[in-house]
Structures are given as structure tokens and as C-alpha cells.
Amino acid sequence: MPSSQQEAPAERTVVPFEPGALPGPLRRLGRHEVLERWQSVDRSGHGARIVAVTGDSADWTGAALVTARPHTAYLKIVDAVGDVPAAVAAVVDHARDRGLAQVKWEGWTARPEDAAAAGFTALRPPLAGGTQDEPGPASGYVRWLSAGAEVTEPPYYRQSTHFSCGAVTALVAQAHAGLLPSRSLDRRAELTLWRDATNFPSCEPVGLGVAVRRAWPSSSVAVHLDVDRPVLLDHFPETEQEWRAHLQGMSRADAARVGVPIVQQPLSSAGIRNAVERRERVLLLISLAGMQGFEVPHWVLCHGTVPGAVVIEDPWAGTATGDTWVDAHLLPVSDASLDTMSAVPPDQFHGAVLIGGEATG
């Protein structure tokens, strides 16, 4: 066809998503149950936007609701309506323009054949956790935007308590390394490892490192902790801090006994990237303030790298904001954002556990 007669490309429009004032074109495109789902939670903290495409009439022919955790390097399509292929292509172009590493697509209404045709790969569904009902869609899809980006997918397991993130990240790390069958990653395994690592109720870096070494004696383990004092105790009354601090002292003695070195320096994003590229697994203590808006220390697994970002597994998702396992799984975070997240208040200390191959001690 001569170029003068080629169909003009669809125009892309990006507007804020305002649940109480949906644009008329969107109401005409979206089914009631889809639009109802979009408005069922407060997505404002995740930068909710409508990416729409227009046809010859300048009216919307397709649209997608996109969100993302703040300070991350991806966009997530919640649903696409109308001309789905055109809407998804517009989201991918929008993500490329922003220099992002990835686009995900929740499987509420996405058909596998449409996802595949748009260059997306199906995500492994989450393992059944302690509650047996993973909030969110039953399926999800991912498309990496960097040329040659290859990240091996670990199993996804959602922590079943508010305090067992450290144990879950360690278990997922070992399952990803082939040292634990994925079918063994269940609530019993989660709470068993947590019980050995806990400082009641959270897991501090040294205790977690010792517990990992005890559970997998053949794996080398090193702890990075840049302060020489007990941590994660500031929110407890002074009388509650004393015995927990004593337990952390015992963990340090255990670390010396079982051969877990404590490196008193922070692990930067460059160090994390180098460790992951050496096929080590990095359990990283972060603050959730940037991604979730509240100041809580939290363990994540760093297991992959792509240009400009480290790929993490987060065992927790904030469903009240529309955050699901699709967000938390294979989650790219820019190097700079990861450096910021890994400085844990109140005094910006850093903690990490590195798990490698065969131990030499």
C-alpha cells in the first residue's frame, strides 16, 4: 500500500485515573464489572493512569488502567478494554518512553493468546500460602523491555504472617537455587525457619543468616550489617528491648561458631548486582516507605538484574491499594531507588544476608 494511503497510527493519551469522574469514552468501552473493580480500591498511591488510544473519529477505541508501586521500574496493566491490542501496545510504548524495564498485565480479563501476541510471557502462578487464597488474579503476564533481558523466575510465595518475610525470602532463595523443592515451600516450612531466625517477632540480619546456615549447611552465608549494635528494636519499650538485644548477642556468638562472617559495611546496589551476577542470592532488608508509603522494615530477595534495575521478590502485597502478587513478583527496582530503600530508619542502617554455593568452612 502506498505510504500516503497507510492507516495513521493510533494517538496515545495518558490521563489520571479519577474513580469518581470516569471519562465518558471509558464508560462506553469498559464492562461494568471491570470498571467496578478499578474503583473498588484506592489506587492513588500507585500513580493510577488511563492510557487510551483514539481512532479516526478522535474518540477512544481502547484503554487500559495502569498502576505501579512508587520508586520502581515497571508499569502494570490492570485491565485493557475496547481495542485491547492497541491499548496494550500504547502502554508498552508509554513504558519505553519512560525508560522502564518491564510491563506486567494482570490476568483478570487478559486472554493468554492476547498476552502472547503482545509479547508477554505467562508468570508462574503463586504457590498456595498459609491462607490458601492468594489475593489478586489467578494469572499474570510479563514483558521485559530491555533487549536480551533474561531473568530466571523463582516461585512466588506470599508470607502468611506480618512478620515472617525474612524466612520466606530465604526459602524462596533456596527454592530458586534448586536446593528446596517448590512443593516444600509451605506454611510449615515458613514458620519452622522463622522460629529459628526470629528476634520476636521480626528477623534481624545476624539471626537470619545463622538460621539459613543451620538449615542449609552446604550453602555459604555472609551477613552485611554496618552497625555493631542490636537493630530493629527502637519501636519497643526499653524493657522489651533488653532481652531482645541479649538474643541478638547470642546470634552473633552463634554466627562465629557456625562460620557466618559479619561484614560491617553496607551492601550497595552495585554490590548486590555483582553478587547476583555471581549467582548468589541476596536477602535485603529495606524500608517500605518508598514503595508502600509506611515505615516498616521488610525483607526482600534480590535475584536478577536488568539494565538499570535489580529484580526482587517481595513476599508481601498491599491488596487495599490494588497491589497484588503480580506487582510483587519479578519486581524491577532501579539501582538508585534500591540504595535509598536499603537505608533503614531511624538511623539509616543497612542489613543483608548473602547466600552462595558450597560452604568452605
Image: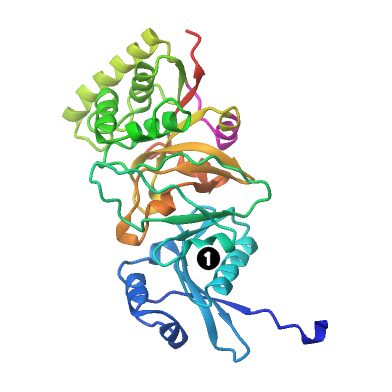
Looking at the picture, does residue 185 appear above or below residue 40? Answer: above
Q: Quadrant of residue 204?
A: top left
Question: What residue is drawn where x is 30% and y is 44%?
Answer: 128
- Relative to 215, does residue 257 appear above or below in the rendering? above
Residue sitting at 37 percent across and 46 percent down? 126
Q: Is residue 164 above or below residue 331?
A: above
**Furthest-front residue in view?**
113
Between 157 and 114, the residue placed more toward the observer is 114
Picture residue at 53% right of the left edge, 65% below the top: 114
Residue 206 percent coordinates (x, y): 37, 22
Residue 253 in percent (x, y) is at 33, 11
Residue at the disc numbered 1: 114
Q: Nearer the viewer, residue 107 or 355?
A: 107
- In the image, which residues are magenta? 264-274
Is 139 in the magenta?
Answer: no
Give the residue type that dot 1 points to: Asp
